[in-house]
Image (spheres, helix red, strand yellow):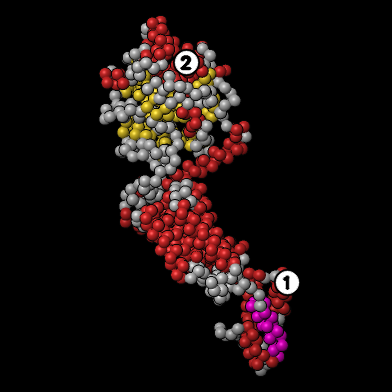
Amino acid sequence: MKLATPSATSTTYSQLQWISLCLGLALAAQVTTLPLWLLVVVCVAVAIRLGLAARGYAAPSRAIRLVISAVSIAMLLVQFHTFNGLPAGSALLSLMAGLKLLETQSRRDVYVVALIIYFLSLASLLESTSFWLLIYLLAVSWLTTATLLKLTHSAPPPGWGPSARYAGRLFAHAVPLALVLWLFFPRFQGPLWQMPAQGRHTAESGLSDSMSPGDITELALSDEIAFRVRFTATTPPPHERYWRGPVLHDFDGHTWRREAVGSFAPAALTPAGGAYRYVVSLEPHQHNWIFALDWPERWDLADARLTSDYMLVQPRAITRPIEVSATSYTQVQASQPLGATMRRRDTLLPPGRNVRTLELSHRLRDEHPDDMGYVRAVLDLFRQQPFYYTLKPPALADDSVDEFLFITRHGFCGHYASAFATLMRAAGIPARVVTGYYGGAFNRFADYWIVRQSNAHAWDEIWIEGRGWLRIDPTTAIAPERVERDLKDAVQSGEPVRWSEGIPWITDMRLRVDALRQLWRERILFYDQSSQNDLLALLHIPEPDGQKVAMVLAFGLVLALAWLTWQVRREQRRESKDPLARAYDRLCSKLAAVGLPRKAYEGAESFGARIARERPDLAREVSALCRRYSRLRYGESLHHRSKRASVAEMAFAARVRTFRPRRAAL
């Protein structure tokens, strides 16, 4: 291993440290998507290079670097089978950055690593649509730019303060150009920020297509956001804010599951109340169902459809945030009788299971032959018997309904929905369990509702002849005094009780931050061709087409570049007219006024020497002033002016003001 030979273009240990830090921060944004072995290789390469630099050694030999590169690239090809695509391309860029840092010797090598860091940041943004990730990567880019400015050839190099401020000015100058390009660059159909998931799945959260008593308990403890809703006019009252999700039909005595509903068209429904129009901003949940307010009637997704049990679905899993505009009626009646197939499906019970529940059902049915009378009797059972609502119910065996109704009597919404549907089916009343969300929290700072995983809920629908499917929520039958208050939820309000709700400023801060995230989604993530046309309409551009968009883009770029040019020239003028330069210009002007102008090629001391030859009477004073200016201007770095130098500059300016040259005598 040979020692590094310092040169004007070589890098220092400090510079390698900072560019390594920038690379590490850029890779941190992709730590969950890159292969573990690749991260280890990059970390080892960086550690080796820093260790050698700390001891004054140069980079490893070319043969060693070639072997490491060949083995690493071969492993990358074996894992991805290609270098095309976002995941493989990001991994290749990361590997290249680590290997390039391993061989870094000159400033040019650092420039290459910095360029790769910028590309890695862009790749991270294509992988994720997070607002906070954008802020983080902007900070990484700002630090990388400041690090590049530290590599300038000035001696001594600029400090971190000036470099960071100048990097900030560069970013500010780029904002108008970025804004014009974002607003007016011609769009394809659909949002620009939309990359395919390429088979990569995030961890699932939210409801599933099955439910065992107690499953929703885990969601009730989650503060994660399921979706946001903005109503365009009237907001439904709290008791009608049921957001429909998976509808469960198949019951094995313990677990309810969703069946394949086939291609049956949903039966026509007759509205019995007003319509509610709204926009749902749905978070990814790896399933194909769309949560809509009961009962959806219209929506703007061309490929979405309504199943026979009135569940809104699309062909693909929702792996990216989407927005759906829909219209729902919360009060409806069926205009057709229930088909024999659906009746048989929704009255089926497993034989030999939950025997005590069946006996209870037969006894109540004998006492209440009327369907609605029987429904009220079952609800009165929950209301009058010592049933309790809790998020920590005891575990149940295979005959879960029997154990809940006759032994534990402590449960969550899933327990009550499962028991109620079983009692209905045992009496010959078609029933099904509906899972979804109930309620939501209003964000008054942005006029929309936030529905979290803690709002997950389960309720029932029963078929009543002459009325159709009727929503029944048996959980609401529990008396408020029998809700365990030390838990996180209060069933009668449908809202989670969080520790932060007792601190108003924390609640307000959370809502403001969420409003900012929603603005990011609406104005950036979903800015598409339609949004661009709306903007052009606001600018009074009739019938916008591609040619007009290109003209507006060109005009905007001209304005942005003109503003940028003006800003740069103004900064240059401001920097060139510091107090010392102004004082020297005044000296030159006074001498020019007496017939001694400074030539363009003359430096200060050359100018003073010529004046001494041509005007011996001014030689002493002018030579002293010119020498003083030369020492003040070039004796110290502009970035490290001391307080003493500032005092000397003021003294120089004062001497120039008192200098009164006279014309030469004829």
The three-letter code of the residue at mark 2 reads Leu
Q: Nearer the viewer, mark 1 or mark 2?
A: 2
Quadrant position of the C terminus in the picture:
bottom right
Residue 231 place in picture, x, y as percent: 44, 33
What segment is highlighted magenta in the picture? Answer: 617-634
Residue 134 place in picture, x, y as percent: 49, 51
Q: Earlier in the sequence, mark 1 or mark 2?
A: 2
Residue of label 2: 405
- Taking 344 as reference, is 76 above or below it? below
Residue of label 1: 644
Is 620 within the magenta? yes
Asked where in the image residue 626 lies, by quadrant, the reply is: bottom right
Residue drawn at point x = 28 percent, y = 18 percent:
337
Foreground residue, 530 or 314? 314
Residue drawn at point x = 33 percent, y = 26 percent:
309
- Circle 2 residues within 10 Å: few <14, some 14–19, many ≥20: many
Is 529 within the magenta? no
Residue drawn at point x = 33 percent, y = 48 percent:
189
Residue drawn at point x = 71 percent, y = 88 percent:
620
By secondary structure, the bulk of the magenta-drawn segment is best described as helix
